[in-house]
Amino acid sequence: MRPLDENETTVVFEKIFKFVGNNLKNIVENPSHEGPEPEPGRYCFRLQKSRVYYVSESLVKRATNISRKSLVSLGTCIGKYTHAGSFHLTIMSLNLLAANAKHKVWLKPTSEMSFLYGNHVLKGGLGRITDSIVPGDGVVVFSMSDVPLGFGIAAKSTQDCRKLDPNGIVVLHQADIGEYLRDEDEL
């Protein structure tokens, strides 16, 4: 497990910034109360076998006793690098994104299952949407009872959604909590 280099850090931060905006500062400076130290530590990003982990520094210090081959996971896996070198956020980053989300979408109860099966969010299933969303923004998808269901990319702006027909795509699906069951072996 090693720290991210400059290029890797830039790519990871750009992807997270797409979803949380200026709240990225809260993620980076989040105090960690793990470990025996009386004063809180910090969280950091580490790379292990093409996966990026969000982990407290005190846990990283304690994990140095474990060889790289034996270390399977440490902290929260927020994403992974593909063979082509691009970075993809995984569903395990949902708690981090939901707590700091800039743009949110709430689904009607009737369309939650469709999203959890991996389908895009349609205008007919939209319960609420935050203002000032533009196409290409990262969006966190919630149920009407504020349970985070997943995340995706906005296909339409907030203003365009008002005049869109009910079968128009509003959010392009990227990840949802149904992946814990569908992709159980790969996570």
Image (tube, grey):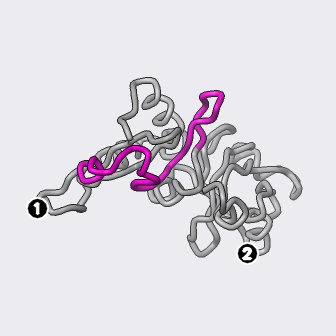
Q: Earlier in the sequence, mark 2 or mark 1?
A: 1
Picture quadrant where residue 83 is located: top right
Quarter in which the C terminus is drawn = bottom right
Q: Looking at the image, how many numbered discs can be counted on the residues?
A: 2
Name the residue located 57 percent from the left edge and 45 percent from the top edge.
89
Mark 1 sits on what residue?
A: 38
Between 79 and 154, which is closer to the camera in this rendering? Answer: 79
Q: Is residue 42 above or below residue 2?
A: below
Q: Position of residue 32 (x, y in %)?
A: 26, 57
- Identity of the residue furthest to the top in this view: 7
In the image, the segment drawn in magenta is 61-88
Magenta highlight on residue 32: no
Between 92 and 170, which is closer to the camera in this rendering? Answer: 92
Q: Amino acid at mark 2?
A: Pro
Secondary structure beneath disc 2?
A: helix
Between 128 and 183, which is closer to the camera in this rendering? Answer: 183
Compared across the picture, whether 169 is left or right of 183 comes to right
Magenta highlight on residue 77: yes
The dominant secondary structure in magenta is: loop
Secondary structure beneath disc 1?
A: loop
Query: Can the viewer see residue 88?
Result: yes
Q: Position of residue 42 (x, y in %)?
A: 25, 49
Picture quadrant where residue 74 is located: bottom left
